[in-house]
Amino acid sequence: MANSKVNHSPQKPGANNNTAAMGEGQGSNKLQRKWEVYPGRNKFFCNGRIVSSPDIQGFLCCMALIIVTDCPYLAVKVHPVIPVVGGVLFILIIGCLVQTTFIDPGIIPRATLPEALETDRLYQLECQNQENAANNGAYQPPRYKEVMIKGRQFKLSYCQTCQMYRPPRASHCSRCNNCVERFDHHCPMVSNCIGKRNYRYFYLFVTFTALMCCYVLGCNVAVIVLRAKDTDIGEAFKKSAGSIIEGVICLGCLASVGGLSCYHSMLVCKEQTTNEDIKGTYNPRKFKDASNPYSHGNFITNCCAVLCGPRHPSLIDRRGFVDPSEDTQAIVDTANARGRIPES
Amino acid sequence: MGQKMDDLSRIPVNQCPKVFVQRDYTNGTQLAFTTKFPQELEGKIDVQTFQKTVTKLNAMYEEAETLSGKTYCESCLACLTAYLSYICISTHYEQMLKKIRAYVNEQNQNVYQPRGLLLIDPVERGLRVLEICILTEQAGGR
């Protein structure tokens, strides 16, 4: 029987997998969840339900800042409505921050070995067809692929780590070591990448924080003004030392967060990411005839699409179980695998 | 075509040859697969059947990603309930993915498996490719 026993699975000694060699996996009694063998640098909590970037310190600092600056103020103010509004804003901010930090930003799972080999094979075929005599035999790793998007030509780069051509608007994050769809930027303050799935929560977080800063600043100023009416201004300043300090902090925060909020509002209206804006991908002054193919034409539709669009599901199956008979995706080494596959 | 079930030599899914239908980006990042018929499937399935499957899948993905009033309401409700509504209610996209999975299973049962092929739901490949496994070898080999 001429069954082609093609071995597609190179043995990886360093893989975090305690199962025995292929075909003898029945001995292992502990099934691993896929998040336990995930190849990127993300951290997982609650048995794979929550994902964030490797350094969580940024998020903790952020939380501390929010709690420390707002809670004393809310405790001090007497008027009933003011703390309620402050409280509501506070809950919204924390909610958005938690969503931004702990959900999958749109990570694209790495290519499986057969996919990576196929991409490799097609690229080599293309190279051979194009260059004919020149450079024959020498292996060239895939680099990019040209596609037409809405009538305009774009280059999709090949990601060496994830072993696939990155979809348009995706980018590889070196901190988290994976490709993220609609990559905006990696935010150390929230300890996560900002991508397709969590951009709206990030935007709302930044906007609500800016609003909260304005609100608190306004209240602080109101406190000082009201006190100055009853007593003289010197007394008022002495009594409201806390308010003054808080006001200064809020002003400092507003300068940064407010600016960020305005910048992202502009990006949302134009349907662009920070990454694209910085690189000037759609800037006609930088690239001739450049235009944004993803924009819906008017800023209202763009805003609705970005902020109220469908919530895409997570593509990385964190809580599924690892199949012991399949090789784990620690590193998909096509060079090694190519050497082992008999050329037919 | 015309092979008896007895003399089909089945290859396990892990080791069988696979055909990858790539994403089609002509309309932007909208989820769609190319309807170009892969060479490797010649003789195993006819072009119209293959294209009908891919077109239907593309239509279902397009419906999942449409910006409609329903999607906006879902997102606004989620925001108002501090995103707790996502725990209770499955989104339109998730419901469409369930329908797509059911469609892939139905196509496998009725169309692809009788021809010795197997469609893998794109969700299992991170929506990168539509993978088709060639489960059977021709009797007699090359």
Image (spheres, helix red, strand yellow):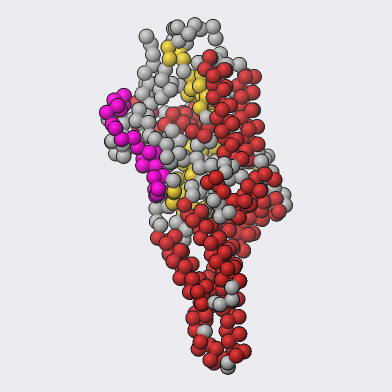
Residue A196 seen from this side: no
Residue B47 appears in which quarter of the rendering?
A: top right
The segment highlighted magenta reads: A22-48
Residue at 63% from the left image edge and 52% from the top image edge: B76
Classify the position of the N terminus of chain A by image quarter.
top left
Q: Nearer the viewer, residue A15 or A169?
A: A15
On the image, the x and y values in percent for residue A14 come to: 29, 39
B119 on left or right of A23: right
State the residue at coordinates (49%, 49%).
A103
Q: Is residue A256 left or right of residue A178?
A: right
Q: Provide residue A260's location: percent of width, then percent of height.
A: 57, 63
Frontmost residue, A309 versus A292: A309
Q: Is residue B58 magenta?
A: no
Image quarter in which the C terminus of chain A is found = top left
Of helix, strand and loop, which mostly describes the magenta segment?
loop
The relative height of residue A216 versus residue A233 in the rendered view (above or below) is above
Expressed as whole percent of the image width and height from the top left, the position of residue A274 reads 56, 55
- Confirm whether residue B134 shows in the render: yes
Number of marks drawn: 0
Q: Residue extending furthest right?
A: A298
Residue sitting at x 57%, y 17%: B110
Tell me the quarter of the picture where residue A88 sits.
bottom right
Residue A32 counted in the magenta span: yes
Point 63% across, 55% down: residue: A268
State the residue in front, A300 or A3: A300
Q: From the top left corner, tell me how far across and down residue A303 is, in percent.
A: 66, 53
Front one among A98 and B138? A98
